[in-house]
Amino acid sequence: MKQQIAVMLALLLSSAVLGVAGCDNESKAAPSASDGGAGVAILNDQQSAEVLNVANGAEVAQGLLAGPRATEADIKAYAQRMVNEHSAIQQRQRQLYQQVGIIPEPTATSTQLQSTANTTLQDEQQRGGRDFDLSYLLNEIKQHQNLLNLIDQAMLPGAQNAQFKAALASFRATEQDHLTAAQQLVARFFGTAGADAGIGAPTDAGPRDGGIGGPIDGGVGGPIDSGVGGPFVDGGVGYPGPY
């Protein structure tokens, strides 16, 4: 299992390096009131395909880590579900890319996504016990919600191929299911108040005080709540979060 996690991390890191070459290729939508006039980076099929590659890979890597490390059986089961379903989704999506001639294209969005996924995984490798359980679930909530926003605001609007657009819509439904399941687990094991506090402002307190704990300021939380946020979350630039 440790070897699997190490391999996934190496793949994530190498993909981030390869993605730098295509960072400036997104097209900008016209500014709108909803995004503060900043404009949303609309992604074409090739660019969206790379985002999906990164997102699926990140979910598999985090799930492989969470399976043996989580303390609750239901959280372990959720992590295994993420590994199984995102692996299967990745395979189906790659088959579709071949069928319709989509070649994934890195952009600033996918590169930032990769970087945040690496940081998240590295942070979670330092955690254990209930601290890990809460950190993993809160990351799952934020990652899935942010990816849903990205699908709605950048990927579906820029989709060109009908089959790819249908696949995106199907993927969105799956992401919503994953988000709901993670939210239910947080509410079940940590309570509604803890879930609300953990998803909100960063804190230096432990999980029982309402936050993930110290590393959230620069590890799990920082990349999600600060410069990575983009118009989808915080009004910053580019990318909506670690998914």
Image: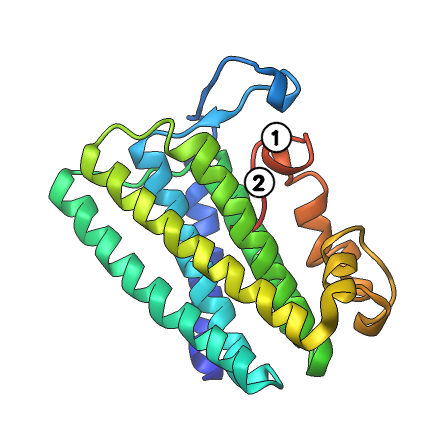
What numbered label is drawn on residue 240? 2
For the point 58% across and 67% down, which residue is it?
A: 184
For the point 43% across and 39% down, which residue is it?
A: 151
The colour scheme is rainbow
Q: Residues within 10 Å of mark 2 (few under 14, many from 20)?
A: many
Of the pair 205 and 228, the residue shown nearer to us: 205
For the point 48% across and 74% down, which residue is it?
A: 78
- Ranked by sequence position, the earlier of labels 2 and 1 is 1
Locate residue 89: give its quadrant.
bottom left
Instruction: Please say whether residue 14 is visible from this viewpoint.
Output: no
Answer above or below: position of 33 versus 137.
above
Horizontal arrangement in the rendering, residue 112 relative to residue 107 (left or right): right
Residue 72 pos. (x, y %):
60, 85
In the picture, the quarter occupied by the N terminus is bottom left
Does the residue at mark 2 contact the one at mark 1 (Cβ under 8 Å)?
Answer: yes
Q: For numbered disc 2, what is the local secondary structure?
A: loop
Amino acid under disc 1: Pro
Q: Residues within 10 Å of mark 1 (few under 14, many from 20)?
A: many
For the point 37% across and 33% down, which residue is it?
A: 156
**Badge 1 is on which residue?**
231
Q: For numbered disc 1, what is the local secondary structure?
A: helix
Instruction: Please say whether residue 190 is visible from this viewpoint.
Output: yes
What numbered label is drawn on residue 77? none
Residue 157 pos. (x, y %):
38, 27
